[in-house]
Image (cartoon, rainbow, N blue to C red):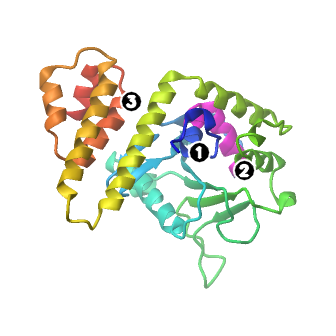
Amino acid sequence: MKKQLKNLTIKDNFMFAAVMLDEENCKGFLERALQMKIDRVQVSAEKNIVYHPEYKGVRLDVYAKDENNTRYNVEMQVSTQSSLGLRSRYYQSQMDMEMLLSGSEYEELPKSYVIFICDFDPFGERKYKYTFEMECKETAKAKLQDKRKIVFLSTKGKNAEEVLEELVRFLEFVKADIKESQNDFQDEYVKQLQKFVEHIKKDREMEERFMLFEELLKEERKSGREEGREEGRQEGRQEGRKKMAEITTALLSKYGEIPDALSEKINEEKDMEMLKRWISVATEVSTIEEFISKIS
């Protein structure tokens, strides 16, 4: 059965990313997750829903930085995965590479956090929070000081006395199903998130973005099923490219008439990954001219 926006809870990737686009929501989460005070955060909207050729799939996460230039990458995980450690390594490397490519020197790399919110226990130790840092096996006195931390939050924790009460209430909200998510969790921050969830469900533009996201996931799953099948593979790819071109055109059409040259360029593009990148760009821009500028 096809998912509908109205049936999502905050544990759904799309809803979580949409809610955390609000900087106060994101700030509140980071303060609870990391147990530290943050004055302000800036959430990167353009990195919110993207297709990563390197990762071979649709990635939907939250990328933010604070007043000290500390970087944060947050992702919701609802199904058990054995490769979360490697996934965190990938995210860390992407944040570092972005800084270096922008002209920063190694010694200027800021603190960074990769945070996974898991609706399962990733390590089976019944903890609400697992924090990882590089350490020396031979002596605790040697500190690497690489400024990196990886944090796993779990909704299945049993050690409430060891973590912030506010974090536990947030994780209980994450764990809740659609009916339970309407409950009173006795927490002002959770109440704020509940209001945002309801607002998003009534937003037509967010509904369009959700439909786009579902199409990307559908196309990704279809590509996966077709992998290894020689017969009909080319036809499937052509159909996929056609669908991606239609989505791009539909997103741009609300900004006015699409120039013939641009329409031709979109329809003749053969690279599926390029088309998916264009879809991502089309969700970010506010004019056709801006779209043309970004893909040129």
Q: Earlier in the sequence, mark 3 or mark 2?
A: 2
Q: Secondary structure at mark 3?
A: helix
The span from disc 3 to disc 1 (Cα, nearest Å) is 21 Å
Q: Where is mark 1, residue-wise? A: 12
Q: Badge 2: how crowded within 10 Å, few (<14), some, or many (20+)?
A: many
Q: Residues within 10 Å of mark 3 (few under 14, many from 20)?
A: some
- Name the residue beneath numbered marker 2: 175
Left or right of 72 in this view: 282:
left
The main secondary structure of the magenta stretch is helix
Residue at 60% across, 74% down: 135
- Badge 3 is on which residue? 284
Q: Amino acid at mark 3?
A: Glu
Q: Which of these two is toward me, 39 or 1?
A: 1
Q: Where is residue 18 shown, x and y percent of the image?
A: 55, 35
Question: From what the image shows, is residue 201 above or below residue 78?
Answer: above
Mark 3 or 1, closer to the camera: 1
Left or right side of 213 for 291: left
Read off the magenta span.
18-33
Mark with earlier residue (3, 1):
1
Question: Which residue does the image show at 59% across and 23% down from the upper left?
Answer: 202
Judge from the rendering whether residue 257 lies leftward or rightward of residue 110; answer left or right.
left
Q: Secondary structure at mark 2?
A: helix
